[in-house]
Amino acid sequence: MRILLAYLICVIGTSGLHGDELPAPSGADVVSPDAKLELLFTRTANLSGGLTEGPAVAPDGSIYFSDIPFGKDHGMILRFNPETNETTVFSNNSGKSNGLIFDSKGRLLACEGAGYGGRQISRWNVRTGVKQTVVQHIDGKRFNSPNDLCLDRKGRIYFSDPRYVGHEPRELEHRAVYMIDKEGNVSEATHQVVKPNGIAISPDGKTLYLADHDNGTDNIDPEAPPPAQGDMKIYAFKIKRKDGGLSQRRTFVDFGATKGCDGMTVDEHGNVYLTVRDKSRPGVMIVDPTGQEIAFIPTGPPNQTGDPVGLPSNVEFGSGKQSHVLYVTVDTSLYRIGLKVNGFHVQHQKKGKKRQS
């Protein structure tokens, strides 16, 4: 049954944080200090808690993103059309999808999480609305809670598998990053991380960036001590040319005692865009390939007290005429902002075309 464009739920003009309420962006080479976040969507569905996540650009330039609720609600995948400025429902049963990405064949890949979700990597035909399971197990054990994913030039899928919420018993010892090869075989790429989250690959295909967002035990393990924040870092791994394995881990960005990064993406120059979920400075931090901050786009007021607002979860560049537009999921909303650089999507690159990081 065709479910794409099932019904209209929102247009630009909903309430939320507005660009003129926030500090000006920094980093004039990347973003104009006059640039403003534009609100595109805010949740209207009767869902409890959670957040929007995982924006992914489709071959037609539209942006698909997840709306993840708490509890037994199935979660949704939504589609924003930049030509009409309309947001519509693609699926009202996403399996609690989180991170999303389109492959080179125009199929939508999704990380389905725990807490009544699918705990798998799934693949959608966006023309028909038909979903298939790509992988659900490794060595006969269910994944913890697939969170975010990326692709390399050879079409291999890398995905992070932490556990933040969920009543389901854990079957795997580690929270790890896994790789699915072109034949559909899944293997562990690394478990040199406590809670793997956002993930991205440099334009030259040599480096995989991975967020370690360790916010404690989340009461998942009854034998564990009370939750306490652990490492909040971005690691960089070397991608082995032959088999795609990960090695030579190094710390790329260390957030110290502050909250760290959720999702991420890269631009054509190899700069990395990190969504910082810290209420003292919520926003998108842009770092160059050495890990040095070169720009910052606030998504919420700084130095907040009480319940935080404006916490970003993930980012994605548009394509075509929108290649310079950065889409950001914040709280339960979707925003965009125009930049001075273009994004990079390996699945849209022509074969043989090389990029430098």
Image (tube, grey):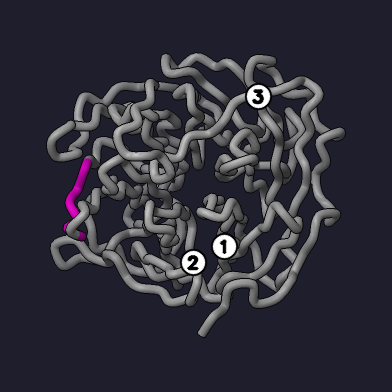
Tell me where the magenta segment starts and ends, as one range.
Answer: 184-189
- Mark 3 lies on a secondary structure that is loop
- The mark found on residue 68 in the picture is 1
Residue at x 24% of width, y 27% of height: 238
Residue 172 in picture, x, y percent from top left: 23, 58
Which label sits in the foreground, 1 or 3?
Answer: 3
Q: Main secondary structure of the magenta part?
A: strand
Q: From this view, report whether residue 29 is shown above or below residue 342.
A: above
Asked if residue 329 can be seen in this view, the reply is yes
- Residue 188 or 154: which is nearer the viewer? 154
Q: Amino acid at mark 3?
A: Lys
Q: Is residue 232 left or right of residue 297?
A: left
Find disc 2 in the rendering and name its residue: 96
Q: CA distance from mark 1 to mark 2?
A: 6 Å
Q: Are marks 1 and 2 in contact (CB under 8 Å)?
A: yes
Find disc 3 in the rendering and name its residue: 340
Q: Amino acid at mark 1?
A: Ile
Neighbour tally class for label 3: few under 14, some 14-19, many 20 plus, Cα within 10 Å? few
Q: From this view, report whether residue 320 is shown above or below residue 248.
A: below
Asked if residue 214 can be seen in this view, the reply is no
- Mark 1 lies on a secondary structure that is strand
Residue 353 in picture, x, y percent from top left: 35, 31
Residue at x 47% of width, y 55% of height: 100
Q: CA distance from mark 3 to mark 2?
A: 34 Å
Neighbour tally class for label 1: few under 14, some 14-19, many 20 plus, Cα within 10 Å? many
- Mark 2 lies on a secondary structure that is loop
Give the mark, 1 or 2, whose residue is nearer the N terminus.
1
Snapshot quadrant of residue 75? bottom right
Which label sits in the foreground, 3 or 2?
Answer: 3
Residue at x 79% of width, y 33% of height: 36
